[in-house]
Image: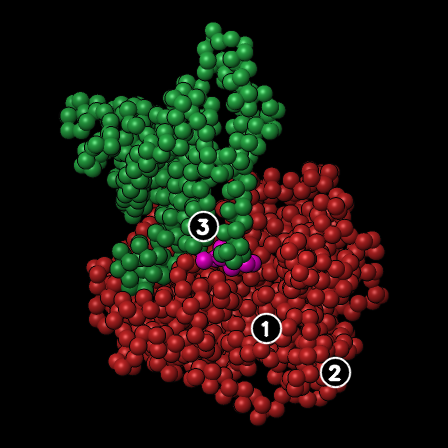
Chain colours: A green, B red
């Protein structure tokens, strides 16, 4: 398949996935017990006031109409109004998303180093002590729940050796140094949680590639070990790890929720939890849709990168 | 002559679960500057292990116990990694066995050659990198393919790229590890021709590792025969082939199928190399026809004998004694009555991708890979399907076995129409056609014992299995009941292929489809599987569709031959008349490419890349490559069918004219210079 065609079909599938997600979210929230109007006006509200509000919120209309209404608004960029605060959701979400993006970017950078370096060390020294030690450590970390890891790191670097702030509270007034310091612990937690699985996948695929005929030929061409590793082995070994990374981005969304909570970081994750606790249905819809979009988008990027790294996939068979 | 590289008393062991195994023992030889030395032996004899040590390379679990590899006076086995890096590629270069897996898949081939030159700073003065790369590609008969990825090239072209890469820094020694094993006969001959041409032009020495003695006859000055890690004979190529001194060399040569239409009386090799059954004396003793009790206990070492050769056998004089390889005319039992028709394929057309909706809307059709195939097989008959790789042989077999529904055409078995797909066929129909695959390693489940591998088809087809069913079928393929409790990995390649054959035979099929089932095996093993198939054919009257690119094997086994080129049947003929009078130009090309046991100064007539590609289904697919092309007629008009004695040919030139007109010497010469012009341009 040619690249534009491949791109088009993948984008189409991504859009379809998101469409299905939107239906699912709507149906689930529809099935939840309780009534939005009652929640806004409280239990003592009069039946008349409730009816008026229902009318304003279009709650008296059939579900299908309301779904189409919501979808239309959403596609136009109108995310609606938060029930809990009464503010426009776009205004509430904006800064939170920026904060989370910053955190994720930071975490992702650390993740790349954290995944690549140990995997390469392991693959090059396979079977030796350092390989086994790293294997044990990754297995240990893999079996550790993320909130526990966050708490341990918090204890180590904020309490026992207080070099980093325990609370990652930032505001618009913070300088970028403060922000960076605040983000170190949550970012490292996220990066470790993502990296442990990728390390294992990357190690195994790298070992396999290092055994391949083309790596042997590269070696026997007289290339320096570094050139063999980075030019011939790594680009081919990284493909399986790419898919893991895309799945990891999905994890990042879930992980962000927990890690932001532990470190009280004012990001998208804390907002999602608040929305759920307050049953702020428009806010829930918006946040879940956005996380779904991030997840689908990440997989799209991973697919495309995999094709770019493997020219074999590019030409039609 | 000046010594370039010398191996002295090399002993190498491999570490495994069961401790150390000696894989190379006391190997010594030398290669002079510019000399081509061949190393030959069955798989597992240690020849590749020795060859890779010429590059100072060994796998992690191998260990050099003693010995030296002296290259220009320095011992490669003692060199540190940095100095080795400087030698590898620059002064000693490798041409790998499998070019498809040896070229980096994600890198353009031009960059892979560039990397070689840049690493060793081997760019000639006054030349740009781009020019040099194009020059190298031209040297190996390729156009500028710099921007292609490996998967966009054919196997032969990929091997040309690895050769271009290997000679990029003008090395002193080229190590070739079975460089043509995966290629079909015509490509193989082109590569061999290219290598000997390069040798005369560049003057580098070669170490050529192969299991194919016939190939070494074409290229090697001297040949070393290895058995179980030891050199058993070293002699000049001609001497070795005409008068082998060691019993093993003798057996190896006798195992080679040849095209002379006769059967050799000398026996091929029996048994297989088994490292667990070695005697303390001569390693070859268990398989040797000349062995005496003394052989079992006395270790044999390589001793020089007359005529600049050495042999490791105390009885070599008796072996070499005149016991001529008498040629006996092959006695074929004449087919008495025409047996009933078993399989018939009519107007078969196949393509891989189904046309998508878009294609249908635009009225596009996908090019078919196989067109208008008519084929008939009688009960108990062996029909060979030959042609180069990519000609559609296996594709046809897939359609017959129901794994590729045909785009058009009918396949019927015993007069009844076969449904196009496996899932529509009845259990009975499935049972009657059994398939044997090329690679037994991949087609046997590694986690099951042979017993369960064999019981499975019986249960599947609901066949009654008596007490001795499994043992009887194993006996049929020359194995004993002891194999039932083994796992496939405990078997040799030949034994595994026997199991695959046994599995197919168990369900009493009417038709066996054998898809290149010999090409992964050693010659000696091949010879015995061919024997087995012949006896099966006689005993059980099972018909076979035998797919192969090796005409020599086909000649020994097949009743009739179908010659396929780029998806079209070029010729159908009984085997004997095909070999004596090939008629069709393409069949001639195939026959000429098959290597004999003598250096024959073969000159390829084919350009490395066919110049014009006729549109599929329009003209003759051979147009542009055919030595007898009749102007533009061939490319534009589909050639008609002519009936011949034992079949038909598809060609514009009538059969009697083809038979009377042999290729003139002038034509041969001009074709030869053509070949060289390709190299020079």
**Residue B67 is at least partly visible in this image:** no
Nearer to us in this view, B376 or A281: A281
Answer left or right for A36 relative to B361. Answer: left
Q: Position of residue B173 (x, y in %)?
A: 32, 73
- Circle 1 sits on which residue? B258
Q: Position of residue B385 (x, y in %)?
A: 67, 65
Residue at position x 63%, y 60% in the image: B394
Magenta-colored stretch includes residue B448: no
Quarter assignment of residue B171: bottom left
Residue at position x 28%, y 24% in the image: A264
Task: Give the alpha-carbon distance from disc 3 to disc 1, as whole Å.
Answer: 52 Å
Residue at position x 78%, y 58% in the image: B410
Q: Which residues are magenta?
A: A311-317
Quarter assignment of residue B54: bottom left
Answer left or right for B233 relative to B366. Answer: left
Which corner quadrant holds the N terminus of chain A?
A: bottom right
């Amino acid at each position: 398949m040619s690249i534009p065609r491949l791109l088009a079909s993948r984008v189409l599938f991504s859009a379809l996935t998101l469409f299905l997600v939107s239906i699912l979210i709507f149906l689930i929230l529809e099935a939840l017990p309780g009534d939005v109007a009652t929640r806004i006006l409280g239990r003592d509200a009069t039946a008349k006031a409730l009816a008026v509000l229902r009318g304003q919120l279009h709650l008296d209309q059939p579900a299908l109409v309301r779904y189409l209404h919501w979808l239309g608004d959403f596609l136009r960029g109108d995310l609606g109004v938060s029930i809990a605060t009464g503010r426009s959701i776009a205004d509430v979400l904006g800064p939170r998303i920026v904060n989370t993006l910053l955190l994720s970017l930071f975490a992702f950078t650390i993740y790349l180093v954290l995944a690549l370096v140990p995997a390469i060390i392991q693959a090059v020294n396979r079977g030796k002590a350092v390989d086994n030690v790293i294997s044990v450590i990754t297995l240990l970390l893999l079996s550790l729940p993320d909130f526990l890891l966050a708490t341990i790191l918090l204890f180590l670097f904020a309490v026992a050796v207080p070099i980093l702030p325990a609370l990652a509270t930032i505001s618009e007034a913070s300088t970028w140094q403060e922000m960076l310091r605040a983000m170190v612990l949550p970012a490292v937690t996220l990066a470790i949680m993502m990296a442990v699985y990728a390390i294992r996948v990357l190690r195994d695929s790298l070992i396999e590639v290092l055994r391949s005929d083309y790596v042997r030929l590269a070696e026997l061409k007289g290339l320096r070990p570094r050139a063999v590793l980075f030019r011939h082995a790594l680009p081919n070994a990284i493909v399986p790890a790419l898919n893991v990374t895309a799945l990891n981005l999905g994890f990042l969304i879930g992980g962000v929720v927990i890690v932001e909570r532990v470190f009280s970081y004012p990001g998208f994750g804390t907002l999602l939890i608040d929305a759920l606790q307050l049953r702020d249905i428009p806010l829930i819809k918006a946040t879940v849709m956005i996380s779904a979009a991030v997840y689908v988008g990440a997989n799209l990027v991973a697919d495309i990168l995999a094709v770019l790294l493997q020219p074999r996939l590019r030409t039609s068979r | 002559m000046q010594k370039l590289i010398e191996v002295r008393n090399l002993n190498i062991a491999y570490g495994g679960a069961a401790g150390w195994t000696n894989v190379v023992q006391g190997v010594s030889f030398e290669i002079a500057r510019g000399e081509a030395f061949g190393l030959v032996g069955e798989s597992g004899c240690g020849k590749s292990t020795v060859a890779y040590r010429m590059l100072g390379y060994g796998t992690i679990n191998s260990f050099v116990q003693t010995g030296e590899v002296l290259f220009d006076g320095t011992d490669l086995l003692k060199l540190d990694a940095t100095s080795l890096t400087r030698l590898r590629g620059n002064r000693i270069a490798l041409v790998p066995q499998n070019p498809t897996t040896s070229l980096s898949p994600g890198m353009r081939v031009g960059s892979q050659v560039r990397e070689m030159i840049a690493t060793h700073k081997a760019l000639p003065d006054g030349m740009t990198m781009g020019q040099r790369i194009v020059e190298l590609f031209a040297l190996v008969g390729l156009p500028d393919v710099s921007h292609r990825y490996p998967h966009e090239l054919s196997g032969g072209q990929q091997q040309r790229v690895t050769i271009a890469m290997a000679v990029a820094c003008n090395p002193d020694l080229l190590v070739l590890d079975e460089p043509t094993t995966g290629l079909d006969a015509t490509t193989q001959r082109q590569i061999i021709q290219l290598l000997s041409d390069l040798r005369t032009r560049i003057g580098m020495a070669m170490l050529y590792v192969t299991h194919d003695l016939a190939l070494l006859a074409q290229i090697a000055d001297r040949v070393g025969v290895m058995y179980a890690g030891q050199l058993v004979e070293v002699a000049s190529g001609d001497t070795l082939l005409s008068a082998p001194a060691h019993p093993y060399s003798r057996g190896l040569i006798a195992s080679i199928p040849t095209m002379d239409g006769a059967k050799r009386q000398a026996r091929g090799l029996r048994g297989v190399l088994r490292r667990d059954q070695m005697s303390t004396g001569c390693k070859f003793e268990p398989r040797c026809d000349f062995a005496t009790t003394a052989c079992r206990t006395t270790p044999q070492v390589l001793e020089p004998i007359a005529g600049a050769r050495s042999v490791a056998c105390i009885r070599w004089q008796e072996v070499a004694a005149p016991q001529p390889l008498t040629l006996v005319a092959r006695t074929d039992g004449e087919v008495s009555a025409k047996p009933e028709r078993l399989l018939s394929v009519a107007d078969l057309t196949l393509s891989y991708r189904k046309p998508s909706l878009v294609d249908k809307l635009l009225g596009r059709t996908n090019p078919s890979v196989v067109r208008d195939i008519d084929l008939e097989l009688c009960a108990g008959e062996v029909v060979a399907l030959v042609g180069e790789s990519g000609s559609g042989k296996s594709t046809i077999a897939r359609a017959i076995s129901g794994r590729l529904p045909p785009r058009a055409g009918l396949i019927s078995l015993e007069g009844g129409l076969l449904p196009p797909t496996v899932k529509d066929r009845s259990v009975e129909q499935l049972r009657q056609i059994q398939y044997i695959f090329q690679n037994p390693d991949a087609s046997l489940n590694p986690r099951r014992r042979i017993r369960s591998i064999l019981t499975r088809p019986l249960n599947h087809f609901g066949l009654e299995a008596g007490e001795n069913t499994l043992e009887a079928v194993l006996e049929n393929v020359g194995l004993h009941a002891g194999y039932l409790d083994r796992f496939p990995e405990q078997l040799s390649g030949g034994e595994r292929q026997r199991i695959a054959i046994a599995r197919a035979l168990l369900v009493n099929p009417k038709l066996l489809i054998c898809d290149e089932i010999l090409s992964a095996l050693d010659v000696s093993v091949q010879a015995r599987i061919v024997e087995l198939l012949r006896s099966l054919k006689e005993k059980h009257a099972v018909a076979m569709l035998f797919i192969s690119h090796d005409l020599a094997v086909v000649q020994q086994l097949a009743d009739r031959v179908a010659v396929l080129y780029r998806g079209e049947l070029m010729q159908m003929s009984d085997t004997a008349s095909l070999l004596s009078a090939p008629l069709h130009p393409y069949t001639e090309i195939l026959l000429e490419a098959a290597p004999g046991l003598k250096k024959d100064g073969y000159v390829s007539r084919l350009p490395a890349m066919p110049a014009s590609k006729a549109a599929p289904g329009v003209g003759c697919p051979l147009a542009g490559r055919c030595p007898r092309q009749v102007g533009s007629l061939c490319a534009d008009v589909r050639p008609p069918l002519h009936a011949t004695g034992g079949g038909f040919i598809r060609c514009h030139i009538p059969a009697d004219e083809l038979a009377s007109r042999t290729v003139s010497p002038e034509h041969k010469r001009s074709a030869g210079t053509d070949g060289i012009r390709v190299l020079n341009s």
